[in-house]
Image (cartoon, rainbow, N blue to C red):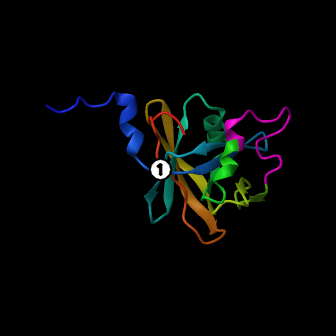
Amino acid sequence: MSDPPPPPRRRPRRVPTGLYVATTLHDGRPLGFVASFVMQTGILPPRVCVAVGKDRDHLAAMRATGAFTLSILDAASQGLMGTFFKPAPEGGTHYDGLKTETAPSGVPVLADALAWLDCKVCGEFNGGDHIVVFGEVTAGALQREGDPAIHLRKSGLGY
C-alpha cells in the first residue's frame, strides 16, 4: 500500500525556481519584492511573466507604471533579497543603501545582480491568489558571468 499524497500546500515544494528582485515605480520611487514565480514565456518577442500577490501594492504600481525590471540573483548577490523581507525604512525605500542602475524604462535594477531585464507590461492573467503579469523584454544585461540562483521551497509556502 502506498503513502497518501501530501496535503495540497506541500505539493509544489520540489519545483525549482530562480530568485529575482522585481521592481517598479510608485510615485516616482522604486518599489520591489523578491520574486520567484518568474518564467520566460516567449522568444520573438522576448517575454517573461511574474506572479504578484493580489493584495500587494506592487501590482497596482506595475499597472500604473506599465513597466517592471527583474534583477536576476546568483550566489554572490542572493543576500540582497534579505532587505526586501523587512519593512522599508521610515520615509525611505528598500533601495536605500543598495547600488542601483536605471534601466531604459526608468525603473531601477540592482547593480550587484547577475543580470537584469527591463520589461514593458503587455498583459496579465488571474492566477488565483496571484496575478500573473506578462512583460515584453525591451532591454537587459548580463553583469558578469555566472549561474542564477536556484531555490527549492521546503513547504511550498515560503523561502
Taking the spot 57% from the left edge, 45% from the top edge, the residue there is 35
Q: Residue furthest front?
A: 1
Q: Is residue 127 left or right of residue 108?
A: left
Count of numbered circles in the view: 1
For disc 1, the neighbor class at 10 Å (few under 14, some 14 to 19, many from 20) is some
Quadrant in which the C terminus appears: top right
Q: Is residue 46 above or below residue 8?
A: below
Give the magenta-colored segment's residue range: 83-98
Which is more toward the observer, 67 or 1? Answer: 1
Image location (x, y in percent) of residue 31: 71, 42
In the rendered image, which residue does mark 1 sit on? Answer: 17
Relative vertical location of residue 81 with respect to residue 58 in this rendering, above or below: below
| Left or right position of 45 against 32 | left
Look at 60% across and 37% down and name the residue there: 59
Quarter placement of the N terminus: top left
Residue visible at 58% across and 28% down in the picture: 55
Q: Main secondary structure of the magenta part?
A: loop
| 75 sits left or right of 154 in the view | right
Question: In the orientation shown, which residue stands out farthest toward the bottom?
Answer: 145
The x, y position of residue 23, in whole percent, is 67, 47
Q: Look at the picture and state if 69 lies above or below 139.
A: above
Amino acid beneath label 1: Thr
What secondary structure is found at the residue carrying circle 1? strand
Q: Is residue 53 magenta?
A: no
Q: Position of residue 41 (x, y in %)?
A: 44, 55
Query: Residue 39: x percent and y percent?
Result: 47, 53
Query: Given the current orientation, which residue lies at the most extreme left position?
Result: 1
